[in-house]
Image (cartoon, grey):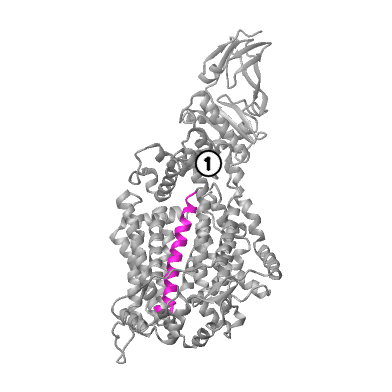
Amino acid sequence: MVTAPEIRDLLEDRPDLEPAVEAVLEPDEPWSFAEVDVDSGAFGELVSHGVVEHAGEEYRVADRAAVRAALDGAADADATAGSASRDVAPSVDVSLPAIDRLELALLVGALLFVVAFRLVPLPTVFRGGDVVLSANDPYFYRYWVETMLSDPGTTLSSVPSGIAKGEPLLVATLWLATVALGGTAEAAGHVMAWYPVVSAVVTAGIVYWFTKTITDDRRIGLAAVLLLAVLPAHAYRTSLGFADHHPFDYPWLALTVLGIVVVADAARRPDATRGSDAAGRRDTNGGPAAVGPLPPITARTVSGALAVGVGVGAQTLAWDNSPLLLAPLGLVLSAEALRAVRAGESPLRIGGPVLLGAAVGAGIAWAGHAGFGWHTTLVASAPTLVVIGGVGVLAAGELAHRFDVPTAALAGVEAVGLVAGTAALAAVRPDYWSRLTTGVTDRLLARRDIAEVQSLFGESVGWLLLFGFILLLALPYMAWGVRRALDDGRWLVPTVYAWYFLVMSAIQVRFVGELAPVIVVFAGLGFVHLAERVDVARRPVPFGDRTSLDLRVPSRETLGPLVVLFLLVTSLSIVQVPVKTSQLTVAEGEYETASWIAEDGAERGLEYPESYVFSFWPQNRMYNYFVSGESESYAYARNNYEEFVRSREPRAWYNSLDGRAGYVVTTPGVVGNESSLGARLHDHDGNRTASTPALVHYRLVHSEADGEYKVFELVPGAVVEGSAESNATVTLRTDVAVEGASFTYVRQTTTGANGTYSVRVSHPGEYRVAGGTVEVPESAVRNGTVVSTAGTA
């Protein structure tokens, strides 16, 4: 609720608003805008500062007594006392942001829209009694969560070493949530399936908050949430079942952005700027002036700094590559110092609280490292390095502000400081420097055949499929944001973050999810501006129309055109969300294949590694999770499977796989050429062809989805011995029938000079040979034992 001193401060800063304040007291409440003699700009200011508030579709004065007291001068003593107290010690304003019922209803609707587009894979995730996570990496985190659940003595300090240096906060959070819901593997599956959706909703809510704060326009905030809902780059990465680490990163990144924006917004308010402009100004003799009164410490400033701290600390503990996500915070501090000096302001007004928040984050990160053993010292120290750099930047900026140093000179000082700091790090901690450079070359700049490390702007039009037309809509306003950021510290934040993550996405497409929450700020502005250009919306507030602060339900005449415009802008995105999401989900044939192998292995009493499934790497963790639960690593499949299918040495590969794997899964498209081992297995079931003999150590045991997925068991093979005419060709045939496939397995050999032969076969059954038959039992195939037959001449 607005207070008399706050209104008095507003009127002292903006005396032109006093007639408007007097006018809104005249009519009986509630009243409409048309009933008061106030121009739209002044009215918007009263709404934005809480003097006037919504009453349904009408308005009322928030606190008539406070307004009258301010106008009558009754608040003068309080204001003077407040000013005096600010001269001595900072004051604390504990007011909280308000949200009316219409705004809340529209926001809830927009968040439900976000959820709807994350539930596209619902039928593929919940299959019978199984929770089938999407893609490959989620089974890595599932493995660690279930490993922690299996040990009753697990604590945050005993997070397994295999994940403690990777994504410890993610796994610990999922583990704690699972424990709260019963602590079973089934509960873990549901927690992991739903956590990306929760992440999307939380991120979208934060996006609304900081977009509204940046733009002063709730319509742009709602548009940003709706565009985020249908943005493929974000939707598929936060879809139901895609329990990768990326969804966990987005809320912390968004919280950091929100914190900086709130600090910047608090610094713009009249009570934050009164009495502080003189601080650090030069006196009339050209020397530095005495430091003036401290700006007030408001609840918004404190909450913003704390948000930065929590965001930075959690972001660091969430991912071992988190320094890449902390870099834009350092860029914001650097850019804010330049902006403030250019505007004649102290960089400490915004940069100071942000830097304090970053220091809190550094403390959180180090506490996780020292207390729980999470992350390496290098990763845990990343926020501290940002703070050290920030101190240098703000100190240089403050000196430049006090001594009227040109902005260009400050930019040069910052550049020199960056080079000096880098050189100092390399000299003082060469081990850190080596690991940093190796990480950049080996992980960020390395080119591999993994989709997420490709460039957003590669040879294909991947950027269009991941962003649709939303990126094209946002880009002009991102350019506009650079100019606006020179005058408004709030706009500096999304501008720096958006351009930074656009560059990072151009290097590796994995960063599109981090780009999404900030790019929709500009896309939302662009959409409202576009709607205004076609006469279905009022002008966006950032372009000067303060009446847009008044949130209204669209009329029937404007709702239809707005929907059509939204569909035109998002049409490609809406189509691409299910397309991109389906590329991650586990196909029905893959799931059925995994289920069959799991059942077969259980019946035979196989344990890992006897039950290990050797498959193409993008599905390897999924297969092994359902078969044995051992889905920690897919490195063996990643390093060997493609070489295996291209090979022409089946015996050598059997010798290599024997004891290391129990099953081989083949799929079309990953089989090599016609004479390769992969083609002989998948295209010919391991049977004889016109140019190649039948395979003897690879036994087809299952075929799924009309032969799209085939399962082979590695076996020694039975040895059939017999006799016939000398130097004669002997052919053995047996009919093989497995679930999903049937064929005649054929083996040929030549007798020796004494008329004997010995041939190895991979299938059990009754073999027809030289006019007779021989029965090869299952045990002989699995154990490699000999089966004799007298044969016929």
Say whether residue 624 is left or right of residue 563. left
Q: How many marks?
A: 1
Q: Is residue 494 above or below residue 594?
A: below
Q: Residue at x 61, y 68 (%)?
A: 473
Percent position of residue 765, x then y: 62, 17
Determine whether the residue tagged by mark 1 lies in a helix, strand or loop: helix
Q: Which residue is mark 1?
A: 617
Amino acid tagged 1: Trp
Residue 166 showing in the rendered view: no
Q: Quadrant of residue 750?
A: top right
Please tell me how crowded label 1 is: few (under 14), some (14-19), or many (20+) other residues with Cα within 10 Å.
many
Looking at the figure, which quarter contains the N terminus?
Answer: bottom left
Looking at the figure, which quarter contains the C terminus?
Answer: top right
Percent position of residue 41, x then y: 55, 82
Q: Quadrant of residue 709?
A: top right
Q: Is residue 25 above or below residue 645?
A: below
Percent position of residue 452, x then y: 53, 52
Q: Is residue 520 magenta?
A: no
Q: Nearer the viewer, residue 56 or 9?
A: 56
Percent position of residue 198, x then y: 51, 53
Residue ranking furthest to the bottom? 284
Q: Dominant secondary structure of the magenta stretch?
A: helix
Residue 500 showing in the rendered view: yes
Residue ranking furthest to the front? 28
Q: Nearer the viewer, residue 286 or 352?
A: 352
Say whether residue 728 is left or right of residue 149. right
Magenta segment boundaries in residue numbering:
244-271
Q: Quadrant of residue 569?
A: bottom right
Q: Is residue 263 magenta?
A: yes
Q: Is residue 717 above or below residue 69?
A: above
